[in-house]
Image: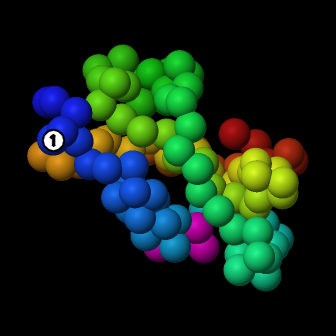
């Protein structure tokens, strides 16, 4: 797949917000969800970051990271996310849709 066939980063961010809205209530701790919802208008945000090299251990080695974008969603302070609630690996290939999410968990929660 060539870069001109990839989903734009703007489209990836739109997809990320849709996925977050649908899945956050089932995956975030109640306090984190309430915090995000109460501060979303002023501080909520998502950023596309360089794809972290830890993704193969979470999704398997067969994922082509060069065809993906990593989106982090949370609450922003001064131009950076101070609180990240989810990391998303989203395929930019419109013919091979894929998304994997790593949610913030309570420090006391057993993984």
Whether residue 95 sits left or right of residue 32 in the image: it is: left
The picture quadrant where one finds residue 10 is bottom left
Whether residue 47 sits left or right of residue 16 in the image: it is: right
Look at 34% across and 24% down and name the residue there: 66
Q: Range of the magenta residues?
A: 22-26
Q: How many marks?
A: 1
Tell which of 66 and 104 is nearer to you.
Answer: 66
Look at 56% across and 37% down and name the residue there: 49
Residue 42, horizontal then vertical, whole percent:
77, 76
Can I make out residue 75 in this image?
yes
Q: Does 80 lie within the magenta span?
A: no
Quadrant the C terminus occupies = top right
Quadrant the N terminus occupies = top left
The picture quadrant where one finds residue 96 is top left
Residue 65, horizontal then vertical, whole percent:
37, 25
Main SS of the magenta segment?
helix
Residue 40, horizontal then vertical, whole percent:
71, 75
Q: Which colour assignment does the render follow?
A: rainbow
Look at 58% across and 50% down and name the residue there: 47
Above or below: residue 96 compared with residue 53? below
Residue at the disc numbered 1: 5
Above or below: residue 67 compared with residue 14? above
């Amino acid at each position: 797949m060539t870069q001109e066939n990839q989903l734009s980063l703007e489209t990836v961010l739109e997809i990320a917000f849709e996925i977050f809205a649908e899945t956050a209530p089932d995956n975030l701790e109640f306090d984190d969800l309430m915090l995000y919802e109460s501060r979303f208008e002023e501080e909520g945000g998502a950023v596309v970051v360089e794809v972290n090299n830890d993704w193969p251990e979470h999704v398997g080695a067969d994922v082509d990271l060069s065809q993906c974008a990593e989106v982090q969603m949370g609450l922003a302070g001064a131009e950076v996310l101070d609180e990240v609630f989810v990391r998303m690996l989203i395929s930019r290939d419109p013919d091979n849709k894929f998304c994997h999410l790593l949610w913030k968990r309570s420090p006391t929660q057993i993984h």
